[in-house]
Image (spheres, grey):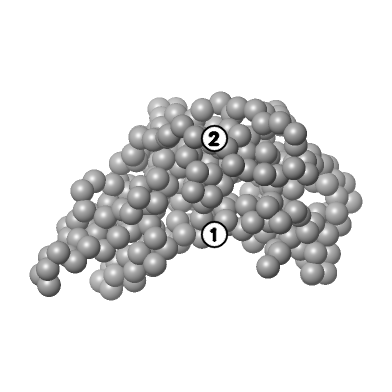
Amino acid sequence: MAITALPPDTDTDIARVTEALAMITPRWNVRIMLALSGPPLRYSELAAKVSWLQGGQLHPKLKTLCDAGLVERAEHSSRHVTYGHTERGAALLPVLPMIVTWAEEHLETADHPLPAIEQIEDSLTLLTRRHAAAILWVLKSRQEVSGRALARIVMPKSDWTNVYPPLRQLVADGLVDTDGIGRPYRLSAAGDGLGPVLGTLSAWSAGQPLNQAAHHPVWGQPQAKPAPRPWVSSQSRPAPAALPPARTREATPTWHNRDLFSHATNVRPMAAIQAGGPRR
């Protein structure tokens, strides 16, 4: 079923990225994924690594991650059950250092340096705003778009004025810019800088190697340099597990969006960042 008025392959791409974000954004999901970065763990071992979770919270979280295909429950015997990443879950982990790299460049520095896990969680909160993925996609591909035109593209079956609450939120978050009421909308420097992150999520959700993000028909395009608009991060939360290094494989791109671009270009590779973020 179509979500936007964009071509079917584009609509599917946006839907997949939105679904991928929905898998990892809920509270504690990323921390549980990081806690499972090593060998499979028994439930008690995992619980010790995420000890801030109150009793009864870990089990439903694990079930959700298992249902999403990111975590695997292996029953070796009635008394020996372990949890570990699926191949798909492990392939998603290199996206996390890329989010840290983006946050270090584009989120406003707090009063104290934030751990990498908090930067990831804060960034994911921005990306999972309602209609955010579709709005960002359209603004990246078309540069400047009026609110009414955005509404016709992003939410064609809804009253066009319904586009303004998510647009105002994205402006407040610093991902979208406008010169005022009635003026077109465009990506900010921070919104444009999300290209590698969203391109990589698109590659992962399509079952492609992450390094194919550079060939994405929209997010693989060179970054513009609009004026930066920082966003203030939230308050401190529990300490994270370590972030894994990025891993990629060679393969040919498989996107088929023929409506906006006739070529693809490379995006500057993003370096893996260890938990806690780089020194400021």
Q: What residue is drawn where x is 39% and y is 60%?
A: 69
Q: What residue is drawn where x is 24% and y is 46%?
A: 38
The amino acid type of the residue labelled 1 equals Glu
Label 2 or label 1, whichever comes before in sequence order = 1
Q: CA distance from mark 2 to mark 1?
A: 24 Å
Which quarter of the figure is the C terminus placed in? Answer: top left
Dividing the picture into quadrants, the one containing residue 24 is bottom left
Closer to viewer: mark 2 or mark 1: 2
How many discs mark residues in the rendered view? 2
Dividing the picture into quadrants, the one containing residue 262 is top right
Left or right of 86, for residue 135: right
Tell me residue 12's x, y (percent): 64, 56
Tell me residue 9's x, y (percent): 68, 52
Residue 252's disc number = 2
The amino acid type of the residue labelled 2 equals Thr
**Mark 2–mark 1 contact, CB under 8 Å?**
no
Residue 72's disc number = none
Q: Is residue 276 above or below residue 267?
A: below
Instruction: Name the secondary structure under disc 2.
Output: loop
Q: What residue is drawn where x is 61% and y is 58%?
A: 15
Nearest the camera: 77 or 235?
Answer: 77
Tell me residue 226's x, y (percent): 72, 31
Nearest the camera: 28 or 269?
Answer: 269
Instruction: Name the secondary structure under disc 1.
Output: helix
Left or right of 29, for residue 151: right
Residue picked out by circle 1: 19
Q: What residue is drawn where x is 35% and y is 50%?
A: 87
Dividing the picture into quadrants, the one containing residue 108 is top right
Left or right of 108, for residue 91: left
Tell me residue 146's x, y (percent): 85, 50
Q: Residues within 10 Å of mark 2 (few under 14, many from 20)?
A: few
